[in-house]
Image (cartoon, rainbow, N blue to C red):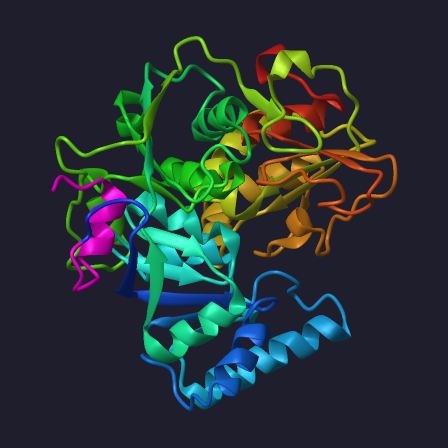
């Protein structure tokens, strides 16, 4: 049988013969992830099962990134629970304090996830690692507790939607725009419990970081996973991150797809997702002129070094509008240091931005940028549900880093070319 990427990876982790979508299979996992919000629930489930040790102390990843630095007493208690469990279990990859970064940027950077892996995480954006050719998906904390104990879990083999992306991205258009365009086409339930498999010249041209940006938002289309073939770029990234045995992986010729979606990026304008769903997508010029109160540049979607460089290119020798709070959150300590060594921090500070530590921060309405009633933000984050970043009476628009930075300068949503 010719396998899609999803089927091929699952087959490599199970002793059962995969015959097609809908089949239930038990698979060995490569890694299990939880954070400061979800890990305490998983730990509770782990203990209630009677487990007394994790399946592999090197393959359980605990990252305290959501409400940290601790927002309040409750968040401090959450982190304490995770810390004590990590120490008791001898977990190698426990991250807080100066080592912590946004989990879905941190794990790839450290080589903990890679091509052909199966990774499950108690966070819906675990699908980010599909940009590296991993079958990575979010699960509930109870399932994660079981996976931490057993090192395996079950999946229903998903049908696959093939996304063919052709053409060449123009200036100020990139991975975020490709994904927003797709979500706008198929809707937030368009890939419900399906795999999104990306291919085409425009995908080959993307950096691995760009591919992770797209994979990150597979869940915003309802997807189980977002997958990219692991090519030479992927292996180069993996080797740099310290993975010595990474191998290329691609779908089989003749694999069966539920359908194919074609996207041509030639002439595409920057895309903006308007409130209150990620599929309410319009070209930036159709949202132009809307005044903003806040811009957020960071998150597991667009907090990597290429995103920081993209924002800095717009902000350099310009000033943020005095009525806008422009919050910059490099996603990991390594990215923060790269920003510093490349002079990007000086650009951000000279422009009047607020630069914070590596944290999820305001993306989930956590801290460091909560919106008041009637306020409007543009953000490089992944969700704009009602109340996502604060008040139920606030609005969040999603964009790429160039649009977010340009809008911070203009005080209103604007195409970067029109600054």
Image location of residue 360, percent across then percent down: 60, 54
Q: Residue at x 33, y 80 (%)?
A: 55
Give the left or right position of residue 198, taking residue 143 as reference: left
Quadrant in the picture for residue 320: top right
Q: Is residue 303 above or below residue 64?
A: above
Q: Is residue 8 magenta?
A: yes
Q: Nearer the viewer, residue 18 or 113?
A: 18
Q: Residue at x 34, y 63 (%)?
A: 154
Residues rendered magenta in the picture:
1-17
Vertical relation: 272 (above or below) 24: above
Answer whether residue 204 is magenta in the image.
no
Visible in this render: residue 342?
no
Q: Quadrant of the C terminus?
A: top right
Seen at 64% across and 12% down, the residue is 285
User: Residue 378 at x, y = what percent?
Assistant: 68, 32
Q: Is residue 156 left or right of residue 319?
A: left
Q: Residue at x 24, y 45 (%)?
A: 20
In depth, the one of 68 and 121 nearer the eye is 121
Q: Residue furthest top?
A: 267
Res 387 visible: yes
Vertical placement of residue 95 versus 260, above or below:
below
The foreground one among 222 and 381 is 222
Picture layout, residue 283 above or below residue 346: above
From this viewpoint, which residue is outermost toward the right?
373
The image position of residue 217, as x and y in percent, is 49, 40
Estimate the x, y position of residue 325 in percent, counting from the top left: 76, 38
């Amino acid at each position: 049988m010719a396998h899609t990427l999803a089927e091929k990876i699952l087959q490599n982790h199970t002793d059962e013969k995969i015959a097609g979508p809908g089949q239930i299979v038990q698979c060995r996992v490569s890694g299990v992830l939880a954070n400061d919000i979800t890990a305490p629930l998983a730990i509770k489930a782990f203990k209630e099962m009677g487990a007394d040790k994790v399946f592999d102390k090197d393959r359980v990843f605990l990252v305290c990134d959501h409400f940290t630095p601790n927002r309040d007493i409750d968040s401090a208690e959450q982190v304490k629970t995770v810390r004590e469990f990590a120490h008791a279990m001898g977990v190698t990859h426990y991250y807080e304090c100066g080592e912590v970064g946004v989990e879905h940027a941190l794990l790839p950077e450290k080589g903990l996830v890679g091509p052909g892996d199966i990774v499950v995480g108690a966070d819906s954006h675990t699908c980010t690692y599909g940009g590296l050719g991993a079958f990575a998906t979010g699960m509930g904390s109870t399932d994660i507790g079981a996976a931490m104990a057993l090192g395996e879990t079950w999946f229903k083999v998903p049908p696959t939607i093939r996304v063919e992306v052709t053409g060449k991205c123009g200036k100020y258009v990139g991975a975020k725009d490709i994904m927003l365009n797709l979500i706008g086409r198929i809707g937030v339930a368009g890939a419900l419990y399906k795999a999104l498999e990306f291919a085409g010249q425009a995908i080959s041209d993307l950096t691995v970081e760009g591919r992770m940006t797209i994979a990150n938002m597979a869940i915003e289309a309802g997807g189980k996973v977002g997958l990219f073939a692991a090519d030479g770029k992927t292996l180069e990234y993996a080797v740099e991150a310290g993975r010595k045995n990474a191998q290329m992986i691609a779908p089989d010729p003749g694999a069966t797809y539920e359908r194919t979606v074609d996207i041509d990026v030639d002439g595409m304008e920057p895309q903006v997702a308007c409130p209150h769903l990620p599929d309410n997508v319009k070209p930036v010029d159709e949202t132009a002129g809307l005044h903003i109160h806040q811009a957020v540049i960071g998150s597991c979607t667009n907090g990597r070094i290429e995103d920081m460089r993209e924002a800095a290119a717009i902000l350099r020798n310009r000033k943020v509008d005095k009525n806008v709070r422009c919050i910059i959150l490099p996603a990991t300590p390594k990215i923060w240091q790269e920003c510093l060594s490349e002079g990007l921090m000086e650009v951000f500070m000279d422009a009047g931005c607020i630069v914070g530590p590596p944290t999820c921060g305001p993306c989930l309405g956590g801290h460091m940028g909560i919106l008041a009633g009637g306020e409007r933000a543009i953000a490089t984050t992944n969700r704009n549900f009602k109340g996502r970043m604060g008040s139920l009476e606030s609005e969040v628009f999603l964009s790429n880093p160039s649009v977010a930075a340009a809008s911070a300068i203009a005080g209103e949503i604007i195409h970067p070319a029109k600054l």
